[in-house]
Image (cartoon, rainbow, N blue to C red):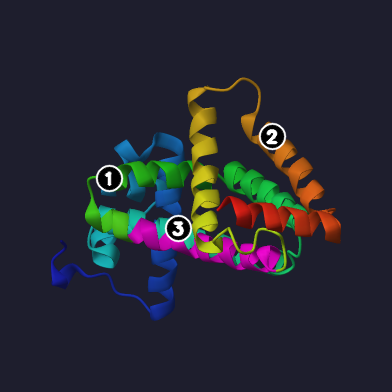
Amino acid sequence: MTDPAEKPAGTATEKVETRQRLIDATMQTIRTVGIAKVSARTIAAAGGLNQALVFYHFKSVDNLVGEACLATTAASVAAFADRFDAVSSFTDLVALARELQAEERASGNTNVLSQVLAGSYANPRLAEITGAALQLRVDQVESALGRVLTGSPFEAVIDAASLARLVCGTFIGLEQLEQVGLSPGSPTTTSFDQLEDLARTLDRLGPIARRAVRSTLRTGR
């Protein structure tokens, strides 16, 4: 901790800007050198700031890492809000999932999240903040799934909340599979191609087919 007498002066706006610079520097550091090498020194170097500012604004490096993950996820959730609100079919949802995966991967956000999750296993505080970040995305996906499932043959047998957690977990899992090279080519592209085919089939089901699927699902429970 820094000495209270050494607390940096500045207006409220300047303090907000400094916090944002620290958050941006943290994300940059994780993307470039990995979470294992994240420290107050490496973060400060990436942001061109005094490392004492890490502790002044966030109390600890762990808090800063968690808050960076939370702020970045919140910004992404807000950026995609209108597109999620416009989802009205399984096809729409899969197309948006593909777009989201591509953007989050290109920005490095998915890679950062997977690293932060790994670092959370032995760190309750980091796990708490990271969980809050993930919940923002889960809530967004759950809302869209709820609309799509309503009136579908799967409404009575699929829980939107549980499926939303599965979907979000799969996003991170696909990134990790590609990182370790377990699948040749691009498993993410192949997976979305197959999901889009399935989604189009589900959306095209006529009334009779929908009733048949609904009846079969209920009977098999």
How busy is the neighbourhood of tag 3: few (under 14 within 10 Å), some, or many (20 plus)?
Answer: some
What residue would you read off at disc 2? 189
Q: Is residue 140 magenta?
A: yes
Which portion, as a residue range, is magenta?
Answer: 129-150
Predominant secondary structure in magenta? helix
Residue positioned 78% across, 41% down in the render: 197
Give the CA separation, mark 2 to mark 3.
Answer: 23 Å
- Work out whether residue 50 can be spotted: no
Q: Quadrant of residue 209?
A: bottom right
Q: Quadrant of residue 206?
A: bottom right
Is 25 colored magenta in this rendering? no
| Sequence-first tag of 2 and 3 | 3
Q: Which residue corresponds to mark 3? A: 134
Q: Position of residue 70 (x, y in %)?
A: 43, 61
SS of the residue under disc 1: loop
Image height check: is 76 above or below 45? below
